[in-house]
Amino acid sequence: MSDQDAVFGHRGNRDASVVNSQGKGTIDGTRPSGPVGQGRAGDPFLIGEGMTGGYGKGPDILNNCTIAVEKGQIAVIVGPNGAGKSTAMKAIFGMLNLRQGSVRLDGRDITALNPQDRVKAGMGFVPQVNNIFPSMTVEENLEMGAYIRNDDIRRTMEQVYDLFPAVAAKRRQAAGELSGGQRQQVAVGRALMTQPSVLMLDEPTAGVSPIVMDELFDRIIAIARGGLPVLMVEQNAKQAMMIADKAYVLVQGANAHTGTGHELMQNDEVRRTFLGG
Amino acid sequence: MSSNRQSASASPWRAPIVFAILAALFVLEGTVRNGMFSGSWNTSLAILNMGLISAITALGVNMQWGYAGLFNVGVVGFLALGGLAPVLVSLPPVQGAWSAGGPRLILSLLVGLGTLALARIVYARTRRGLLVALVLIAGFVAYRWLFDPAVSAIEANNAASAGNIGGLGLPVLLSWAVGGAFAAAAAWAIGKVALGLRSDYLAIATLGIAEIIVAVLRNEDWLARGVKNITSIPRPVPYEIDLQQNPAFVDFATRWGFSAAEASGIWVKLCYMSLFLVVLLTIVLLAELALKSPWGRMMRAIRDNETAAEAMGKDVTARHLQVFILGSAVIGVAGAMMITLDGLMAPTSYNPLRYTFLIWVMVIVGGSGNNWGAILGAVLIWFLWIKAEVWGPNLIGLLVGPLPDGDVKAHLLGSAPHMRFIAMGAVLLLVLRFAPRGLVPEK
Amino acid sequence: MDILNALVAFLNFVFIPAAAYGAQLALGALGVTLIYGILRFSNFAHGDTMAFGTAITIIATWGLQSLGVSLGPLPTALLALPIGIAGTALLVLATDRVVYRFYRVQKAAPIIFVMASVGVMFVMNGLTRLLIGVDEQRFDDGARFLIAVRDFREWTGLAEGLALRSTQALTVIVTVIVCAALFWFLNRTKGGKAMRAYSDNEDLALLSGIDPEKVVRMTWIIAAALMTIAGVLYGLDKSFRPFNYFQILLPIFAAAIVGGLGNPIGAIAGGFLVAFSEVAVTYPWVKIAGYLAPGWEPGGLLQLLGTEYKFAVSFVILIVVLLFRPTGLFRGKSV
C-alpha cells in the first residue's frame, strides 16, 4: 500500500475497462544502490548477520537474526507461521530496510545494494508467488532470466532443461498453463539462468502435491551438489531438515535454534514445539 | 515518499474558507469591472446558476464515485436524457402529432422492449443462442415495421415548425423529477449489464451509452426535433419582458438604482437561483441523511473493504447498482434543470469533454467522497471555465504584446480561447499531484 | 441472380471501407492495449493524442508541400509521418516524465493514472486546438484512386462500379507492415520480450534486470508511433476534425476490450470485428439484395440502423462479448 492508494481508497479498482492491476509491482525499483564494502575474514559464502528491521516504517519483524550458507550446501529457514522466515530471506535480498546488521556475499558487503543489483552481484531469487511470466513461453521465461547476460545463454538453458526434463518438453508452451510443480521448476530455472553464485528459494513447495514436492527437493539437492549453495525457506519443516546441511529455526524474527538438519531433528524442544512430536 | 500527501485531518475551517473565497469571486464579478471581471450582476448570477446545476451533476457523480467507487464516464448521456424530460413533459402538445402515429409509436417501443425481455427469458430457460437470435430478429422486424411508418407520419406533421411528438403540457418543475426517472431507468439498464460481470466494465459501458443517447437525441426528430432544436421550453419563473412591463417592478428597480432591463434579468436569475438552491440543498440533505443511516454505513463498509462485506453476505453488486441508479437520477435532474434554464434543447451542444470530463475535474478538485467538496469544486471550476475564456486572451494579449504584428501573433491571439482546455487539464493534474484529496477532503 | 454485380457492390460499399476503417481501429486499439498491458491503465488521452500527432503531421505536410516536396502518387503526409511520430513521441515522453512517472514511482493505484490521463486529455485537446484549430482539414494529395468507378466499369463491363481509393489501400498496407513489425518486435527481440515480461510481472521483470523506466519509455514511443499512424491514416481516409478523434475513442476502446485488453492480436481482431459490424449494420443492403433476388422489391432500404448509430454497434458487440467471454475474444489481462 502506498500513500497514493490512500487517496482514492479502493475506488475504481474494480473497473476492468480502465484499470489493470494484474502483475502490478510492489518493489520500489527506484531506490539507488549504495557502495559495496569489504567482507570480513572467515565469513561463510553468504551471510545476513544480526539483521534487524521491518517493512517501510512498520515495526521490526526481524530481531538480530543471522542466516548463513556455505558453498555447496543447503541451508533452510524454518519456523512457525509469522516467525519472519520469508522476511529474513527478503532482508538478505534487500527488499526491506535493515536498521542494523549487514549482508555479505562472497567477500563483499552488499548491505547497501538494491535487489536488482544483488541479482547482478550473484543472487538468484525465486519469490514464493508470482515467480514466472505467465503469458510467456517457458523458453522466454528462461531468456528473461538471462536478461542481464550478454554472452551465449544456450548452454545454461540446456543445463536447466537437463535438470527439469518435464518443462523441457513444454518449452514452447505458455508458462501460465503449466501445472503448479512445473511452474515452480520454471521459476527455479529462470533464477538459474543468471548463473547465480547462490540460489534463494522462498517456499518452493508451497501448494504442490507431496510427490511433486519430493521431486522438487531432489532437484534442489542436485543443484546444491553441483556446487551452487542454496538458501531456502520451507513450510514443510521435516522434509526440509532432512535435506538441509544447516537449518535455522526462527521464532518471532530471532534465531531460536541453529544446527545441521540432523541435529535439530534430534533436538527435543524443536521436535516438541513445532515438528509435532 | 509522502511528499504529496495531504494531512489526513484537514482543518474544519477549510470548507468555509473555500466557500468564502468563492463568494468573494462572485461578488467581484458582480461589482468590479476590469480586465478580469465583468462588473455585471447578470453575468455573475448566470455563472452561478450554471455552477449550481454543475454542482448537482457533480453531486450525482460524487455519489457514484465517492460512495461506491464507480467510474461513470457517461455523465453527458444522463444529462441529455434528463434534458429530454422538459421537452416531453412541459411543452404543449403538438397538434395532430399524437393522432398521426402516437399509439403506433408507443406500441413499437413496447414491442422493442418486450423483445429484449423475451430474449432474456428465452435465454434463461433454454440457453440456446440460436433461439435467442431468432427472437431478436423477429422482434426487430416487428419493431421496425411498427416504428418506421409511425415516425414518418409524426415527422411529416407540420414539419416546418414541429414534426415531433410534442409534450404533455404539464408544469416544467414536474419534468425535473421525470428527468431523474429517465436517467435512473437508463442507469438501471446499463448497470444491470455492466456491473454483473466478473469485474465491472462500467467505464466503457457508460461511455458507450452516453454516445448512443446523444446520437438518439440528435437524430430522432420525432422525439425532440433533433438538430432542429427545441426552443421556448416553458419557464418556472417570470419572463423578463413581463417584468419590464410591470410598473410595480419598474418602480422597485429604479428605487434600487437599476434599469428595468438589468433588474428584470437579475430578478429572473435570482428566482432560478432560489429554485436550484432548494433542489441542491434537498439533495445534499438526503444524501447526508442516507450516509448516516444503516444503509450508508453499509455502503461505507463495502467501499472500505469489498471482500469483507461480501463475505458478510452483503450483495455488493446490488448495492453498487443502487448507488449507480441514484447518482444517475441526480444527474438526470440536473440535466432537466439545465434545459429549463436555457429554455433550449440543442442536442449538438452535448459535448463529453464539457459535460462528462469537466464534471470529473469538479469532483476531483472538490474532493472525492465529500458532498460539500463536490459542490464547491463544481462552482469554482465552472467559474474558472467561464472566466478562462476571458482571461486566456487577456493573458495572451499581454504576453504577445511586445511581439511584432504577424502571423504568429495573430494565430496565438486567435487561439487564445482554447487555452481554457489546457488550464482545466493543468488544474486537474496539479490537484491530483499536490492535493489529491481535493479542496475539501473526505472526513 | 447477378452474383458478380452483388459481389462488386459488396466489395465497394462494405468490404473496402470496413477493411480500411478496421485497420485504423486496429492501430488505435493496439496503442490502447499496449498502454493498458504495460502501464496498467486505459488512456483517455488516446484520441486526443492521435489528433495531436495528426496535427503535427499535417503541419509538416503543409511545410513539405510549400517546399515543393511530394511523393508523386503517394500522399505527402507519408513523408511527414516520421516528423509527426517524433513530435508525438517527444510530447508523450515529456508527459510521462511530468505526470505519470511520479505516480509510477509511488506505485499508485491504476485509477489515479486514469484520472491523470483525463487531465492530459484536456491539455492535449487544448494543444491540438492551439496548433491547428477545430476546423476540418484535408491534407490528402497524390493520386486519389487506384481504381476509379468508371475505369472499373469499362474494364469489366459490369453495371456496378468499384472504387478503391489510394488512401484505403495505403491504410491497409501500412497497417499490415506496422503490425508485422510490432509483432516481430514483441516476440523476437530482447526489448519486446522485456516489455511483455514487464506487463506479465513487474517485480520479476525488475529482478531479472529489466529497467522499468526503459520499458515504459519504449512503450510510450511505440504507442506514440501507433497513435500518430492511426490518426494520420484516419485523417487521410476520412478527414481531420479534432472532435472526431475524441469520438473514435469509443470504437477503439471497444475493439481493444472485445479482443481482450492487453492482448495485441486481440486488438487487431477487435478492430476489424467492430469495423465490419459497424459498416455491415449501417449499410443499406437493398442494392445488393436487388442483384441477388431481382424480382424482390423490399419495402425499405434494408438498413438495420442509420449510420448515425454506428457507435451503438460497437457498443452492442462489446456488451455481447463481455456477457459471454468476460476476458475478450483472445484472453486479455482484464480478468
Image: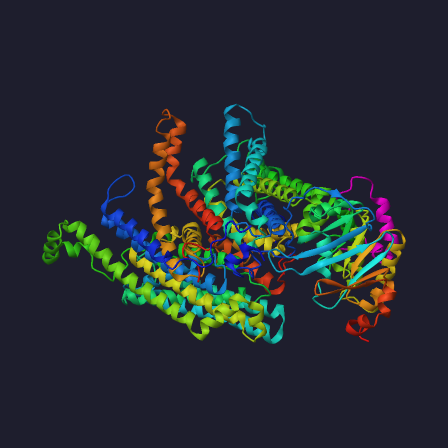
- Residue C144 in percent (x, y) is at 55, 35
The residue at the point 87 percent across, 66 percent down is A263
**Can residue B345 be seen by looking at this rendering?**
no
Span shown in magenta = A146-174
- Residue C79 in percent (x, y) is at 58, 31
For residue C137, side relative to residue A245 (left or right) = left
Q: Residue A170 sits in which quadrant?
A: bottom right
Residue A153 inside the magenta-drawn segment: yes
Q: Residue B362 sits in which quadrant?
A: bottom left
**Can residue B190 be seen by looking at this rendering?**
yes
- Residue B312 in percent (x, y) is at 57, 75
The residue at the point 46 percent across, 43 percent down is C123
For residue A202, side relative to residue B211 (left or right) = right
Depth order, front residue of A244/B334: A244
Q: Relative to C88, is B316 above or below?
A: below
The residue at the point 54 percent across, 55 percent down is A3
Residue C227 inside the magenta-drawn segment: no
**What's the image's color scheme?**
rainbow
